Amino acid sequence: MLDELSAAVARHSAALWTHTAVPRLSLVSVEETASAELLHEPMICFAVEGAKRTTAGDRTWLIRRGDLFLNSLEVPVTASAHQAPFRCVVLRLDATVLAGLLLELDTTELRALPSPDGQVAAPITPELADAVTRWVRLLDTPADIGPLASGIETEILYRLLNGPVAPVLRQFAIADSSLSRIRAAARWIRENYDQPLSIETIAATAHMSVATLHRQFKAATGMSPIRFQKQLRLQEARRLLLARAGSAAQVATVVGYASPSQFNREYRRAFGLPPAQDASRLRQRVTTA
């Protein structure tokens, strides 16, 4: 089943990351093992070939063929194909769709749910593999997408809600869960990453005390709010430098650094080279690929 699914991903992947005509379905196909700095959105990745290493803060996951990986937050990560080619099917999560499905299920467990991590991995069951394969194969018959896609997506989510990732999915869908409040805090930091960080403001946004915010934010993302902001700043700086959007000092100011020397130190610590040299290396890699 995974061979058939991998072949379908390869057949319909136009680039590294391909959004498709099926709502909330994307395909990933990576042919080399180079690492990349990414902002992961809430999603489920079904790995069907190769392996991928993902690092967020102090946490690292190695996702191999036959694994699924659920990320419930917008979080900056470093990702690389540990074994290439790496191919996966991505279901982009929609809290409204999940909440609608939960209304049809037994919700007696919701009040007692713990505060889970923001990311979790599990094996792909045969039933899930079958449903995901049928979902991707809709791309072979576009006329079937409208009538069938939402029903297959519901089946996939239903099976996930009856498996080991269910606690995280349920927390994702519930408006006032601790995970949803951490998601609101992460969103605030992302939208204001270039501004001075106010822990008190973020805690108020999340309706938490400062101490609770620190504890639960790190539990969900693998990093503190300050480190989360730093990762966002450095990722954006790298993107701007690659696009030749200014000198290192100018880019440092744009992403919120008051001290260019601090920016240079943290950039080199994160990416292994000073900003200008790293940008030159990236441009060379892109143009020779």
Image (spheres, rainbow, N blue to C red):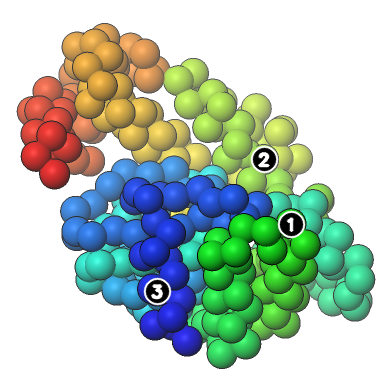
For the C terminus, the quadrant is top left
In the rendered image, the vertical position of residue 211 relative to residue 88, given as above or below:
above
Is 2 positioned to the left or the right of 166 in the image? Answer: left
- Residue located at (48% from left, 65% from top): 89
Q: Residues within 10 Å of mark 3 (few under 14, many from 20)?
A: many
- Residue located at (85% from left, 67% from top): 102
Mark number, residue 184: 2
If you read the primary sequence from the N terminus, does the residue marked by circle 1 or circle 3 appear first?
Answer: 3
Residue 252: x and y in percent read 29, 17
Residue 223: x and y in percent read 44, 50
Q: Which residue is mark 1?
A: 146
- Check disc 2 and give the amino acid type: Ala
In the rendered image, the vertical position of residue 255 relative to residue 47, given as above or below:
above
The front one of 205 and 16 is 16
If you read the primary sequence from the N terminus, does the residue marked by circle 3 or circle 2 appear first?
Answer: 3
The answer to which quarter of the image holds residue 139 is bottom right
- Residue located at (47% from left, 87% from top): 1
User: What kind of element bears circle 1?
Assistant: helix
Residue 125: x and y in percent read 56, 87
- Check disc 1 and give the amino acid type: Gly
Is 284 positioned to the left or the right of 144 in the image? Answer: left
Q: Which residue is mark 3?
A: 6
Real-space Cα distance between discs 1 and 3? Answer: 23 Å
Name, please, the residue furthest toward the bottom.
126
The front one of 29 and 173 is 29
